[in-house]
Image: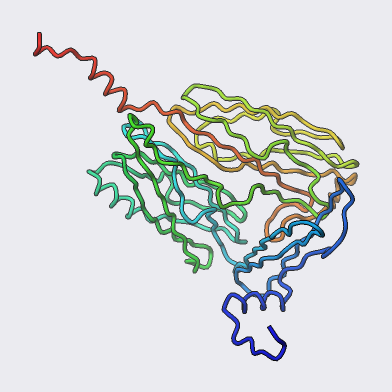
Amino acid sequence: MEPWADPGEPTEEKAFENHILEKNIFNVHPRNGSLEPGEQMELNVYYYPKEVSQHYLKTFLQIQNGKPLIINMMGETLHRRAYMRLIKDIYYLPPTPIGLEQAVTYPIEIKNLGITKLNYKIDISPLENLNANNYDFTIFEIQNPVGTLSPSDIQYVYVLFRPLEAKEYAVDLPIKIFDIEGACPNQHVLKLRGQGYHPEYITEMPREVNFYEDLPNCRAYFGEEGQQAAFSYESIDFGEIESGQTSNRFVILYNLSQTQKLKFDFLKSGLMCGDNLKLEPMNGDLEPNSHQNIKMTLIPARWPTHFEGEIQCSIDWYTGDEDKQEMRSIHTNTNMPDNQEHLFLRLKKRTKFVSYYIIIYSFISKIPDYDNY
């Protein structure tokens, strides 16, 4: 556009982008540099919010004689109150066969991002109406519709799903949030989508929606010196397991620091919703530039469960002065110690279905027809 031309009024999106650039809400350091073959560099992204709002900015990392990379920066500034987070807007449960003897349990992660304790209450009246309209059959059930979360606390809402027919089920459940000041202005809706299919027509089973389809490939909280600890794999799939069957996996934890010793500790999690996950070892120390093999053993519960989510491993760095424990801070709005980092390991497991419908059908088919004798 020529300098003398009138660009007109900017669009709402362009005005929002200009506001972020003028206020320097996002900043990257260093902005430029060069890398030798095999060399790597840490880029620090700073977020300086000026108001309570969501901020996002699309940036480009230009590579000389190469293809530019798109980096999407997103941040959100919260009120100084309780704030609950759901990872996804809509939860598409994996396709489930009809005729199951027991419902399948799914864990849904919730987290308190605020600085005060919160109480939540899920309105299950839409769920009860859906069940009533399906011959009073319990299609959906919430095991823990009320609960309490401390600041930075992660818990799980356990959803039970047992389809009656080969069709799609949908229900939206409002969630009310309360803290010490009363009802919170931010309200959430737990949107559940379930699909039933006939076990005899396995070829017509609907496609499963990938749980992490629209989420980052990996998550980690680490400090200004960059990532000094890492897993050999960021995702572990235990596959389909029958009740009583044991599944084993291995992952390696690396201490990439050349000078500092670390202490690791896997945090307890409700993700497995009844399944027993054994980690050997669950905690320990790692010398500089060393590694630890972690054996993972999953023993499924008697009832069917599907889960896909993350477990956390806390990393504490020894500084040589254990009284001060002065180390980098990797959280800005949590109560985590300054010398602590977190690695996240994704886990996935599916129950191998033995349909109750198939059992009954097979039994009936073997009964002789005495009228023909």
Q: Residue at x 60, y 43 (%)?
A: 310
The quarter holding residue 20 reads bottom right
Q: Position of residue 320 (x, y in %)?
A: 90, 44
* As drawn, 67 above or below 56: above
Q: Residue at x 22, y 43 (%)?
A: 135
* As drawn, 358 above or below 59: above
Q: Quadrant of the N terminus?
A: bottom right
Q: Position of residue 339 (x, y in %)?
A: 79, 50
Left or right: where does residue 44 sit relative to residue 333? right
Q: Position of residue 353 (x, y in %)?
A: 41, 28
Q: Quadrant of the C terminus?
A: top left
Left or right: where does residue 126 sit relative to residue 324? left
Left or right: where does residue 32 sit relative to residue 114? right
Q: Position of residue 187 (x, y in %)?
A: 47, 64
* As drawn, 33 above or below 240: below
The quarter holding residue 50 reads bottom right
Q: Residue at x 51, y 39 (%)?
A: 307
Instruction: Determine the residue located farthest toward the top in the rendered image.
Output: 373
Question: Looking at the image, which is closer to me, 128 or 104?
Answer: 104
Q: How many marks?
A: 0
